[in-house]
Each structure stands twice: as C-alpha cells, then as structure tokens.
Amino acid sequence: MWRDHLTEIIVFSALFLLVSAMGFVAARWRAPKDMAHLDEWGLGGRSFGGWITWFLVGGDLYTAYTFVAVPALMFGAGAAGFFAVPYTIVIYPLVFLVLCRLWSVSHRHGFVTPADFVRRRFDSPVLALLIAITGIVATMPYIALQLVGIEAVLKTMGVTGDSALARHLPIIIAFAILAAYTYQSGLRAPALIAFVKDSLIYVVILVAVIYLPYKLGGWGSIFDAADAKFAASPNPNDGILLNANNQLQYVTLAFGSALALFLYPHSITGVLASRNRDVIKRNMSALPAYSLLLGLIALLGFMAIAAGVKPLPGAKEGTVDSNTVVPVLFDQQFPDWFAGVAYAAIGIGALVPAAIMSIAAANLFTRNIYKEYLKRDASPAQEANVSKITSLVVKVGAVACIVFLDPQFSIDLQLIGGVIILQTLPAVALGLYTRWFHRGALIAGWVAGMGLGMWMLYQIPNPASKRAHFGGSAFPLSDFGFDTKKTIYVGIVAVLVNLVVAALVTLALRAAKVADGVDGTTPDDYFADEGDPRVTPGPDRDADSAREPVA
Amino acid sequence: MTAGEPETPRAASSRAKDHSPWNWLLFIPIVVPLIPALFNADSPRIFGFPRFYWLQLVWILLGVATTTLVYQMTKKRGTH
C-alpha cells in the first residue's frame, strides 16, 4: 500500500515539483531576443557550450527506460544485457567525425532536422519525407517508453488504482506539466532540468555501487549469486558469460544500436544545439562518463539477484513486471528517504529525454511536412508555433499509447524503432560523406531494408512470454537456411540489404541516365565552424545572450 | 553562394578540414569492444569482477583516451 511508502512519495513529489518549476523558468534562461523562431525554441539558439551539451546529450541518450530496462535484462538474461556498454563505447568515435560534418552543414544552411539535410543534399522532397516519417515513427514509442520508466517507480511506491484512469492519473499529470513547460521553454527546459536529473543519477548510482556490494557481501559473491541463478535456469542462453551462440548477436546488437542511436532525431537535436565543432568533439571524450554509469547501473540487475528481489506482478495474471527489479531493489535496501531520491532520479530522468524527443519529432513535422507540403511560405514564427503545438500532440499520443494500449505494444514498437531508424543510415550518415548514391536508389534501399526488417522481426517468437511474433531482435540464422544456432541483430541485416539495394539501383539509374537532382551543398560546407560569416541565420543573433564559459 | 566567390580570410581560418591521419585511430575503440574473444571469460577476476565485466569497463577508458588524443592532435592551431 502507498501508506508504507509515504516518505518516498513525499521526497519524490518534492523533487518533481522543483524541476517542474525549473522547466518554466528555463524560458528566461539565456533568454533570446525573439523566442518565436524554431532555432530558439527547437534548438536552444544553437548556442550551448561544453557543459550544457554534456548534460543535455547525456540526459538525452541515457533515458529512464535505459536505467530500468538494462538492469532488468541483466536480471533476466545475464551477460547478454551488458551489450549496452560496448554499444555506448562504440558510438562516440563514430559520432566524432560524422556528426561534426552534420553540425557544420546544418549550421551553414540553417537545417533543423536530418531530413532538412537530405532534402538539400539529394534534392528530393520524397526522400526527405520518408526520413522525417521514419524519425517520427521511431521516436513516438520511445517517448511512450519513458512513461513505462515512471510507471515502474510509481508501482513500487504503491501508487496504483483500481480503474485504468486512477492508475494512470499520476502519469497524466506529470506529462501535462512536462508538456506545458516544453511548450513554453522549448529545448531550454530539458537542458536546464538535465543538470538536476544527471546530478541525482550520479549520486544515486555512486551510493548504490559502494553501499550495496558492502551489504550484499562484496562483488565476488554478487557475481557468484548471478552465476548460480543462471546455472539453475533451463534457458541455454543466459549466464554471466556469453556462449558460442549469442556472441554474434551481442556484437551486432551493440554495433547496430550505436549506429541507430545517433540517427535518432533526438540525438541529432542535442548535437545541433551545440555552439561549435569543438564542443561536440570535446564531448565525445566526456560523454563516456555516462557509459561507465550505465555499466554500473546494468550490474544493479545482478545485485537484485544477490538480494533475492522478486519483481512485482505484471498487468496480466501470472506475469511479472521485470521493469520493477531496480525500484524494488532500492526499496528493500535503501532507507526510505534515499529510495525517494532514487525514484525521483528515474522519474525526472524520464522527463528530459521525453521533452527532447517530442521537440525533435515536432521539428521533423514542422520542417519536413508542414513547411514542405502544407505551407511553403511559413515564417519562422509560424514554424515555431506549429512545432510547439505538435510537441503537445506528440505527448498526448504517447500518453494515449500507455493508457489505452498494452505497454508491451510500446516496447515492441521501440524494438522496431531501432531497426527502422537504421534504414536512414545510407541517406543521412553516408550522405554526409558522399553524393554517389542516386536519390531514387536511396528510396529503393529504404523500402527493401524496411520490408526485410519488418519480416524478420515478425518471424521472431518469444518463448518466455509465449508470443509468436515480435519477440525480440535476435534473428536465428537457421531461418536463412544456415546450419547453426547463432543469432544476429535484425537491424544489421536489414541495413546491409538496404545498402546493397541502394548501390545496385544507383548503378542501374545512372546507366539509364535518370535525372538525379542538384546537390545544394558544397564540400566546404561540411567543415564550416562557428564564426564562419556564411552561416545562416545572422551572425549577431545571440550576441547579447549570456555566453557560458567554455569548459 | 557559388564556389568561385572569393572568401574572406576569417572564413578560411574558421574552417578545419578533417582529413587527418590521426582520425584512423578512431577505429581502435570501434573495433576492439566488438571482439568477444578478448573479454568473454571469467578469469582473472579483479575486485570480484569477472574479466567480461571489468575489461569492457576498461574499454570505456580506451575510447576516452583515443578520442581525446585525436581531438588534441587535430584541433585547429593558433586558437587554443
């Protein structure tokens, strides 16, 4: 019952209200002369320095869902869940070069979304539309999943109700507040809140990794307890080490997820908001601090095993909600007030990425659907306004997903989201390096990659939850006719097919001399930096907003 | 603007090319963490962590060291 958790609820609510107030105040933080511009509302004036970018992108990439789901995966499957660590190591060297080029070309031409870039580079509104829709569809379930993170915490505090509405009321209120301050403050709100969120998370995790092993008999016995649990389970693919059959899956999932992560519109929004190339490059050395944190968070799953945590029951009879593993561990092991702080860290942790994702999705709609197809001559103020309203719609949609549909549906969609966002790789990431691909071929490759990816995901059953389709992202190679038990990440296969199709169709279209449009960028654009007089919009726009000292 | 337009000196100096041989180093932290043969074992344990866990956490340092080195070696001269 919730009365047993009163201290936790009070601490949680107090911290939640504090950051809500910060969200509204954020509109005045580093205030621009004119907020009615998409660059201001949607990209924070493109002026964030090293520290803000570190907190913003860190708070953006490492979401509440990650903090809840990765340890839950470790709890259930062991070593396979640790893929999150190589995944978040590999991403930074990849981003170091690629997103710097995207930053430069976007700064030079005033692009707000990856689809803006594709539109200009390949001179194809259709391809840009596909990229925009892919981004929106991949982002929506991701926002809904942030709610799953908050719900796991609320459930552990006993904040539940008999009817569906009563059960979801706290989340509806939380998201209404979030929607209001995102509407008012734009990207400045999550940037400011991220300071609180990340500080709380760092404190909680540092305490957890020092205090919990001390209580549970040391790291050695934590790993031994996990080993004993997996040795006793009938599943052949769990354990504290990988086996011969899931190594390929581990590696391809880590690599594919890294490629997917920086193609997500919300990551690109975070990067484009930074002030210059140096800020991005320095951050690639500083952001892995979060990867260390994530590695330690993952191990909370093993601590939960050692502490004998039993996850709370799920929505249906006889199921368990594995996302409650970490909240229950905190509830059992920490004093009430500190468990409240930990829950607040997770709850607030959901707000930062949810805000950035809804802004990114709103920007895609505004720039690549509204301005392209509905109102060609939209002014910057109209663009900002449409984006603000769209961000509200996006959040209502996310809440509706959680309230009216089985949360499992959002989890499935997010699984699909990683696979489909990867299909924008040839146009967005390779497009930053080469104009070799034909615009028609990129569309063909996208269609092929999407089709194959969907088919593969559909084929994968999940024996644990007794579902026949969309049971995971590990595709058995035996389904392709290979005589092996190895599995591979669906996204990698789909994007490889996408690339092959794009290359072959490019050759065919070039041979047939099909028109290929005009590249609206020059090679120089990809190196433009702050202070380049050619960058749009005007150079003195943020001259009197307070500059943050360079970190 | 057209490619033939003359550039101001400021424009030229504010742009960095990223064709540096140092950038090839970035492949190390991309490839090494993706070779399970290196870390998929229990021993040796350090502070109770099996090799699988501590060595993958060490790769984080490898990534930080590499990106820092490449950044220092390729950043624009004269501005810092």
Image (spheres, rainbow, N blue to C red):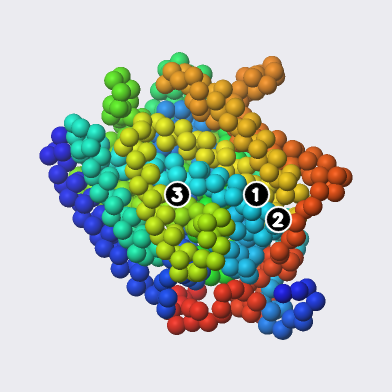
- At a point 20% along the width and 32% down the height, the residue shown is A163
Q: Is residue A234 above or below residue B41?
A: above
Which mark identifies residue A122? 2
Q: Is disc 2 surrounded by few (<14), some (14 to 19) or many (20+) residues within 10 Å?
A: many
Gap in angstroms between the C-alphas marked 3 and 1: 30 Å
Going from N to C along the chain, the mark reached first, 1 or 2, is 2
Left or right? Give the position of A457 relative to A322.
right
Q: Name the residue under label 1.
A: A127
- Inspect the image, locate mark 2, and give the three-letter code of the amino acid beneath it: Phe
Gap in angstroms between the C-alphas marked 2 and 3: 32 Å
Farthest residue toward the left? A3
Q: Is disc 3 surrounded by few (<14), some (14 to 19) or many (20+) residues within 10 Å?
A: many
Gap in angstroms between the C-alphas marked 1 and 2: 8 Å
Q: Mark 3 points at which residue?
A: A62
* Foreground tag (3 vs 1): 1
Q: Is residue A108 above or below residue B70?
A: below
Identify the chain of the residue marked 1, using the numbered disc in the image: A
Q: Is residue A348 above or below residue A42?
A: above
Q: Position of residue B19 (x, y in %)?
A: 75, 63
Going from N to C along the chain, the mark reached first, 2 or 3, is 3
**Quadrant location of the N terminus of chain A in the rendered image:** top left
- Inspect the image, locate mark 1, and give the three-letter code of the amino acid beneath it: Leu
Identify the chain of the residue marked 3, using the numbered disc in the image: A
